[in-house]
Image (spheres, rainbow, N blue to C red):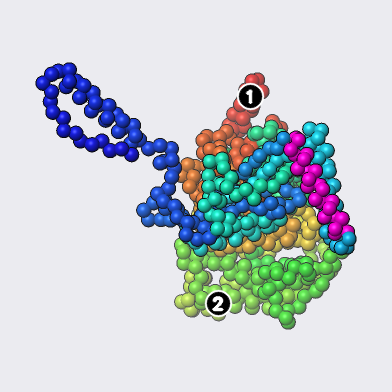
């Protein structure tokens, strides 16, 4: 860069010479201004770059920080014989990595000559290996010869092309330790797809330059031959179509115009990590409609059974139209859900890591049963039930504040529960839940083995008051439980479970049942009701061995309302992890997913959710979405720039598609509970059709 030097200019006495001198100064000033403007390389170049190691370097990007980088490439022998579409996403979606694909198309004549030379070498090697008797080498060489001959024929007749391809990349991290850890992760990820990564050892500068957008490959030994089919798998973009080929139709692909499907339980072609699904979007974005469509279509097309907790009373019309059971849970109804009811569990014998089994002791009694050719361990999980009951009582006693049960209160309640269970002569053996007696069930007299009475809240209250009524440490328990007794103002959870005439017995076989908790007091009683009903659905709907082969989903709209209860979220997270073994999953939605992210346990729920459907998001949540869901800029643009209602991004694992839900006019009449919204939808639909 040239600096403008000051010149001493003497004023000329003649006007003409003075004008020439002024023009000279002006020209030099313009030249200085032009030369001092930064060019393209000044803008994109870092402050400094240093390579002082064999396989990595450092970049200085600001006054206080350094970025470490490591170039690598896929060597000639590092590709598998068959490559899956979109394998490159394993590199591009795992962290900060720059990837460059170097592609050179060969002419037909040169391609055939190269392949003929390669074929001669392969046949010569085959002859040698046959003389040696190396069976493994013979089989591999015969396969390569056959592939080469087929490729030669395809190129000769113009059905294929021949390319030289190199794959180069640079990984970045904030420290050498992070860079090493990240590099090992990348290597493990690529090895899983039978790819091999090689370091540019002692060629760091060449490796780094090869990835820069300069169009020059300095690692020439990275090039290998490929045909058109193999090269097509190098597409860096996520497939425009979803992974599911059947199941529940969820909408129309905005790019391809084709119908997209959700099969939360997978199929022979694609098996998800878990069967849980989530829907996120601001109020009015279409998430409730999408959830109702999934339930309606899943019930009719995929044979899925649904148990629903309805916090806002929006599912009534849907459940009634589909012939399900809709239960109104409130203080005035005669419905009772006993949170202390005991039931037996059936765990497959090959499932040794189930949490219920871990709580069993050697002297606990149990039995082995066989069903559908599979053996199960059947037992009554008393210890787990006591822990669940204590969590429920913790929610009741702590109320709207953060004062959870202290050690004395937990001891009193645990003592009461164990005493009542022992008094009922219930052990871990399943037969202890039954007794030979005469009982009236739905107006019929039964004389056989019938269920014993369940432990009740009144029994717990009576035990505590009689034994510790004078203890100051028990005062809070007694005061908290009293309103929940059958004589109090909230008698929903005290007594033997009763869901209505004929309902209890048919619940196990019902394909659709919903619990409406919208009439419960929002800030206190509704979270308690959610906790109890979710536990009930887990015990009697998801874990029921009669439904072992049936596909089951527990549906929980507006999960954000209940994440403030640590006990509820903890139990929800456990079920999210364990329900897959029961051939079940959880379908939930939330308009405030940030509350889920900020809860440690709720994050565990997200981590155990394989399929995600994003609708319009609040701009204030942009940073959180970028950090936690690794969405591309294009996907972010769709979610934050006023998408239409029902339009969003559907993600299954690492695959994303842009879709719009497509309810028919007939479906809208029973999935949309708001008449004004329904009228607006039908109006807009007619306008689109007229266009």
Q: Is residue 104 above or below residue 84?
A: above
In the drawing, what numbered circle is on residue 688? 1
Report the front residue among 534 and 30.
30
Q: Quadrant of the C terminus?
A: top right
In the image, residue 601 lies at what x, y percent? 56, 61
Report the front residue among 125 and 298.
125
Residue at (62, 22) in percent of width and height: 687
Q: Is residue 455 above or below residue 279?
A: below
The magenta stretch spans which residues?
108-130
Judge whether residue 500 is colored magenta.
no
Residue at (62, 48) in percent of width and height: 220
Describe residue 54's horizontal placement relative to residue 80 as left or right: left
In the image, residue 125 lies at what x, y percent? 82, 55
In the image, residue 518 lies at what x, y percent? 58, 49
In the image, residue 468 lies at what x, y percent? 53, 78
Residue at (84, 65) in percent of width and height: 374
Describe residue 297's horizontal placement relative to residue 644 as left or right: right
What kind of secondary structure does the magenta stretch mostly adopt? helix
**N-term mark: 1 or 2:** 2
In the drawing, what numbered circle is on residue 411? 2
């Amino acid at each position: 860069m040239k600096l403008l030097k000051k010149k001493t200019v003497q004023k000329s006495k003649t006007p003409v010479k003075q004008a020439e001198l002024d023009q000279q100064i002006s020209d030099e000033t313009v030249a200085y201004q032009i030369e001092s403007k930064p060019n393209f390389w000044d803008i994109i170049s870092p402050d400094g770059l240093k390579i002082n190691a064999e396989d990595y370097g450092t970049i200085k990007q600001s006054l206080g920080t350094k970025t470490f980088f490591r170039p690598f490439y896929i060597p000639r022998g590092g590709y598998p014989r068959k490559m899956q579409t979109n394998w490159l996403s394993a590199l591009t979606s795992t962290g900060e990595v720059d990837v460059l694909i170097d592609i050179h198309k060969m002419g037909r004549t040169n391609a055939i000559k190269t392949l003929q030379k390669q074929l001669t070498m392969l046949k010569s090697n085959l002859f040698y290996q046959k003389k040696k008797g190396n069976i493994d080498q013979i089989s591999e060489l015969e396969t390569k010869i056959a592939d080469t001959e087929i490729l030669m024929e395809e190129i000769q007749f113009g059905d294929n092309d021949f390319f030289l391809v190199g794959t180069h990349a640079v990984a970045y991290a904030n420290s050498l330790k992070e860079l090493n850890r990240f590099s090992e992760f990348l290597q493990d990820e690529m090895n899983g797809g039978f790819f091999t990564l090689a370091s540019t050892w002692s060629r760091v500068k060449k490796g780094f330059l090869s990835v820069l957008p300069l169009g020059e490959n300095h690692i020439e030994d990275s090039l290998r031959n490929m045909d058109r089919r193999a090269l097509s798998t190098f597409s860096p973009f996520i497939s425009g179509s979803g992974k599911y080929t059947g199941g529940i139709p969820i909408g129309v692909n905005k790019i391809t115009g084709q119908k997209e499907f959700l099969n939360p339980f997978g199929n022979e072609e694609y098996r998800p990590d878990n069967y849980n699904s989530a829907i996120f979007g601001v109020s009015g974005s279409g998430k409730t409609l999408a959830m109702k469509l999934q339930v309606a279509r899943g019930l009719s097309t995929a044979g899925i059974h649904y148990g629903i907790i309805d916090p806002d009373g929006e599912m009534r019309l849907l459940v009634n139209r589909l012939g399900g059971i809709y239960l109104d849970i409130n203080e005035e109804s005669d419905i009772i859900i006993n949170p202390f009811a005991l039931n037996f569990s059936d765990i497959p014998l090959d499932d040794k890591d189930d949490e219920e089994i871990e709580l069993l002791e050697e002297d606990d009694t149990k039995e082995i049963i066989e069903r559908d050719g599979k053996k199960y361990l059947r037992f009554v999980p008393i210890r787990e039930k006591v822990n669940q009951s204590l969590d429920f009582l913790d929610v009741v006693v702590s109320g709207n504040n953060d004062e959870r049960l202290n050690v004395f209160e937990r001891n009193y309640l645990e003592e009461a529960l164990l005493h009542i269970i022992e008094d009922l002569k219930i052990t871990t053996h399943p037969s202890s839940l039954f007794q030979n007696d005469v009982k009236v069930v739905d107006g019929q007299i039964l004389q056989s083995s019938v269920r014993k009475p369940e432990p009740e809240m009144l029994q717990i209250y009576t035990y505590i008051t009689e034994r510790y009524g004078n203890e100051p440490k028990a005062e809070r328990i007694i005061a908290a439980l009293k309103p929940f007794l059958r004589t109090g103002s909230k008698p929903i959870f005290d007594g033997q479970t009763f869901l209505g005439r004929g309902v209890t017995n048919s619940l196990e076989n019902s394909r659709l049942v919903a619990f409406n908790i919208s009439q419960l007091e929002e800030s206190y009683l509704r979270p308690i009701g959610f906790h109890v009903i979710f536990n009930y659905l887990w015990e009697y709907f998801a874990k029921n061995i009669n439904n072992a082969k049936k596909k089951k989903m527990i549906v929980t709209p507006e999960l954000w309302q209940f994440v403030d209860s640590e006990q509820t979220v903890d139990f929800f997270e456990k079920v999210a992890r364990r329900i897959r073994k029961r051939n079940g999953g959880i379908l939930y939605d939330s308009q405030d997913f940030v509350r889920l992210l900020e809860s440690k346990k709720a994050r565990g729920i997200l981590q155990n959710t394989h399929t995600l459907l994003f609708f319009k998001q609040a701009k204030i949540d942009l940073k959180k979405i970028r950090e936690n869901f690794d969405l591309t800029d294009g996907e972010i643009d769709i979610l934050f720039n006023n998408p239409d209602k029902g339009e969003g991004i559907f993600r299954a694992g690492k695959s994303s598609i842009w879709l719009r839900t497509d309810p028919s006019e007939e479906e809208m009449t029973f999935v949309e509970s708001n008449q004004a919204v329904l009228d607006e939808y039908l109006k807009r639909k007619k306008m689109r059709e007229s266009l």
